[in-house]
Image (tube, rainbow, N blue to C red):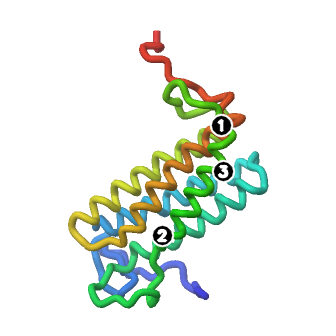
Amino acid sequence: MVTISRIYTKTGDQGETGLGDGSRVPKDHARVAAYGTVDELNSVLGLALAEGHLDQQLTALLRGIQNDLFDVGADLCLPCKPDEQLGKVLRVRPEQATRLEQAIDRCNANLQTLRSFVLPGGSPASAWCHLARTVCRRAERDVVMLAHSEPVNPNVIIYLNRLSDLLFVLARVGNDNGKDDVLWVPGGSG
């Protein structure tokens, strides 16, 4: 259990922050950017949930994803060590991405076949899912960028990749299972 008794510590006043292993890095470090974007994604999902027009099953799914995203943030906050023992540190696991794949398959089964690209929008819930999808893609890019310079749990990248796919599907679900999707019309701006 986590206990938080003080909100401000003043330890970041000089532009540095502490990682999970106690080391300090600049607040613009690629690792901080990556888990910061994951936090932003989680907040967008909170807005989608606050919209309140999701059924119980989708609400439970998004709440589970929010918890997973805290796992992703915790994973990214703690640099991987070469001698790390499996199971001793909270890391994103393959079965978390598998759960997303199962949700994609379940939700996608009821969707109309796409004949064009989908524009973000439609219902408010759909629009929030589209925004979450784009923030998720940015989080994925941030993690990939971090992985170019430091070891990263590959399951984090897989999880975020699957999550962006699921968010696209959920955006379509939010548009009456795709019936109210706003479709791209090439050259259709005028």
Amino acid type of the residue that numbered disc 2 sits on in the rendered structure: Pro
- The answer to the question of whether label 1 and label 2 lie on touching residues, with beta carbons closer than 8 A, is no
As measured in the structure, the alpha-carbon distance from the residue carrying label 1 to the one carrying label 2 is 26 Å
> Can you say whether 123 is above or below 40 in the image?
above
As measured in the structure, the alpha-carbon distance from the residue carrying label 2 to the one carrying label 3 is 19 Å
Pointer 3: what residue? 106
Looking at marks 1 and 3 on the same chain, the residue that comes earlier in the sequence is marked by: 3
Residue appearing at x 28%, y 64% in the figure: 146
> Can you say whether 117 is above or below 141 in the image?
above
Residue 120, labelled with which disc? Answer: none
Residue appearing at x 37%, y 76% in the figure: 12
Q: Nearer the viewer, residue 7 or 117?
A: 117
Looking at marks 1 and 2 on the same chain, the residue that comes earlier in the sequence is marked by: 2
Pointer 2: what residue? 94
Q: Is residue 174 left or right of residue 121?
A: right
Amino acid type of the residue that numbered disc 3 sits on in the rendered structure: Arg
Looking at marks 2 and 3 on the same chain, the residue that comes earlier in the sequence is marked by: 2
Residue appearing at x 51%, y 73% in the figure: 71
Q: Nearer the viewer, residue 184 or 25?
A: 184
Callout 2 environment at 10 Å: few (<14), some (14 to 19), or many (20+)?
few
- The residue lying furthest to the right in this view is 56
Residue appearing at x 61%, y 41% in the figure: 171
- The answer to the question of whether label 1 and label 3 lie on touching residues, with beta carbons closer than 8 A, is no
As measured in the structure, the alpha-carbon distance from the residue carrying label 1 to the one carrying label 3 is 10 Å
Amino acid type of the residue that numbered disc 1 sits on in the rendered structure: Leu
> Residue 126 location in percent, x, y?
63, 40
Badge 3 marks a residue whose secondary structure is: helix
> Residue 128 location in percent, x, y?
60, 44
> Residue 53 location in percent, x, y?
75, 46
Badge 1 marks a residue whose secondary structure is: loop
Pointer 1: what residue? 111
